[in-house]
Amino acid sequence: MFYPLEKLHLLHDGYRRAFRIGRIDLLLIQEDGRTFLIENSCPHMQAPLTHGAIQQGVIRCPMHGLEFNLLTGRSPSCASSLKIFMPAYEGNLIGVVL
Ligand code: FES
């Protein structure tokens, strides 16, 4: 099922918005022209990543500083990976299929 999240024309570099669908917290991000959709919950201790610093496709958790690749979800210092979602598109909307 497609869940719309945002209108495509509202995305821009620096865009960041948190969503909740059912029990899933999502974070939609656009940086350097690339769009990422991740679970908004750090795999270390479930802190929200909404205000995590992003640099070169890596988000840094504001709680303890672990870093996660936004494409793979992997971290060099955490055994658990951040959950990554594939953005889905319908008309002028970006969303997610769950
Ligand atoms: S909760 Fe994110 S690094 Fe600890």
Image (spheres, rainbow, N blue to C red):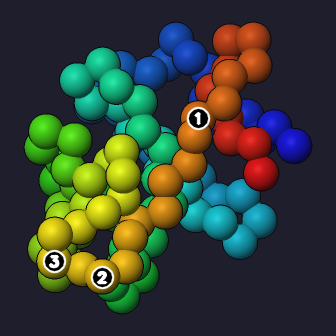
Ligand 1 within 8 Å, label 1 CB: no
Disc 2 to disc 3, C-alpha distance: 7 Å
Q: Which mark is residue 79?
A: 2
Q: Could you tell me which secondary element the residue under label 1 belongs to?
A: strand
Of badges 1 and 3, nearer the viewer stands 3
The number of callouts visible is 3
Q: Is residue 39 above or below residue 28?
A: below
Which quarter of the figure has residue 50?
Answer: bottom left
In the rendered structure, the answer to whether residue 60 lies left or right of residue 1 reads left
State the image coordinates of residue 10 (x, y, percent, origin top left): 49, 19
State the image coordinates of residue 84 (x, y, percent, origin top left): 49, 54
Q: Is residue 70 above or below residue 92?
A: below
Ligand 1 within 8 Å, label 2 CB: no
Front residue of 96/86: it is 86
In the rendered structure, the answer to whether residue 19 lies left or right of residue 77 reads right
State the image coordinates of residue 75 (x, y, percent, origin top left): 23, 67
State the image coordinates of residue 32 (x, y, percent, origin top left): 22, 23
Q: Could you tell me which secondary element the residue under label 3 belongs to?
A: loop
In the rendered structure, the answer to whether residue 57 lies left or right of residue 50 reads left
Residue bearing the label numbered 1: 87
Q: Which mark is residue 77?
A: 3
Of badges 2 and 1, nearer the viewer stands 2
Front residue of 44/48: it is 44
User: Mark 2 is on which residue type?
Assistant: Ala
